[in-house]
């Protein structure tokens, strides 16, 4: 089953029905797990009931980190909370709020392709963020490389007719 709530005068009422109510409850429970990392991208912070879920979790769980990637300007409702709640980190194209401090980006000393272009932070663009995360996740750890070598040796040994 697929369901969507489109912008309308009845949007709030529709969001208080199943399956959205069940999904909000699941989100609330997930956000209240200790030491949770929440990454938010592509959300405008225009829904007060969802904002309250996020802000409440950040306030109650000080070791939970909320990282928000904004495509354009930082929404004021988000800025107000991030300035008061140090575990809400907000990263926008021209400025950021980190640890409750708001400031503009300084051009990075080292070239950071895909992350910065001049003094503009690019990861607020969902496509750029997805590309960055995909590249980050595809790196193999030293243990992963060693495991691949060992498995390769086993396969070669078996293919050579030395194993059964």
Image (spheres, rainbow, N blue to C red):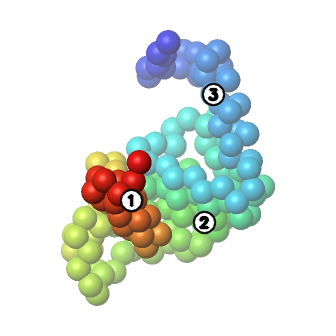
Q: For residue 152, what is the image quadrant?
A: bottom left
Under circle 1, the secondary element is helix
Between 122 and 149, the residue placed more toward the observer is 149
Seen at 30% across and 81% down, the residue is 108
User: At 51% from the left edge and 68% from the top edge, which residue is drawn?
Assistant: 97
**Residue 76 location in percent, x, y?**
51, 53
Q: Of helix, strand and loop, which one carries label 2?
A: helix
Q: CA distance from mark 2 to mark 3?
A: 28 Å
**Residue 154 as seen in the image, left or right of residue 12:** left
- Residue 83 circle label: 2
- The front one of 111 and 154 is 154
Q: Residue at x 68, y 46 (%)?
A: 31
Q: Position of residue 40 (x, y in %)?
A: 49, 49
Quarter of image, res 101: bottom right
**Relative side of 35 to 102, left or right:** right
User: As displayed, is residue 25 above or below residue 14?
Assistant: below
Q: Residues within 10 Å of mark 1 (few under 14, many from 20)?
A: some
Q: Are marks 3 and 1 in contact (CB under 8 Å)?
A: no
Q: Earlier in the sequence, mark 2 or mark 3?
A: 3
Task: Determine whether label 2 and label 3 are within 8 Å by CB.
Answer: no
Q: Nearer the viewer, mark 3 or mark 1?
A: 1
- Mark 3–mark 1 Cα distance, whole angstroms, equals 46 Å
Earlier-in-chain disc, 2 versus 1: 2
Residue, disc 3: 23
Give the label on residue 154, or none.
1
């Amino acid at each position: 089953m697929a369901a969507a709530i489109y912008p309308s005068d009845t949007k709030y009422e529709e969001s208080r029905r199943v399956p959205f109510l069940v999904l909000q409850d699941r989100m609330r429970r997930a956000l209240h797990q200790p030491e949770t990392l929440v990454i938010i991208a592509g959300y405008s912070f225009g829904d007060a009931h969802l904002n309250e879920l996020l802000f409440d979790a950040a306030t109650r769980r000080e070791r939970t980190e909320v990282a928000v990637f904004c495509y354009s300007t930082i929404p004021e409702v988000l800025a107000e909370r991030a300035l008061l709640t140090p575990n809400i980190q907000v990263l926008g194209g021209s400025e950021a709020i980190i640890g409750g401090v708001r400031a503009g980006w300084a051009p990075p000393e080292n070239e950071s392709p895909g992350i910065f272009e001049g003094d503009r932070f690019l990861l607020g663009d969902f496509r750029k963020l997805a590309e960055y995360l995909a590249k980050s996740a595809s790196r193999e750890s030293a243990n992963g490389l060693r495991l691949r070598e060992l498995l390769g040796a086993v396969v070669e040994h078996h293919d050579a007719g030395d194993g059964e």
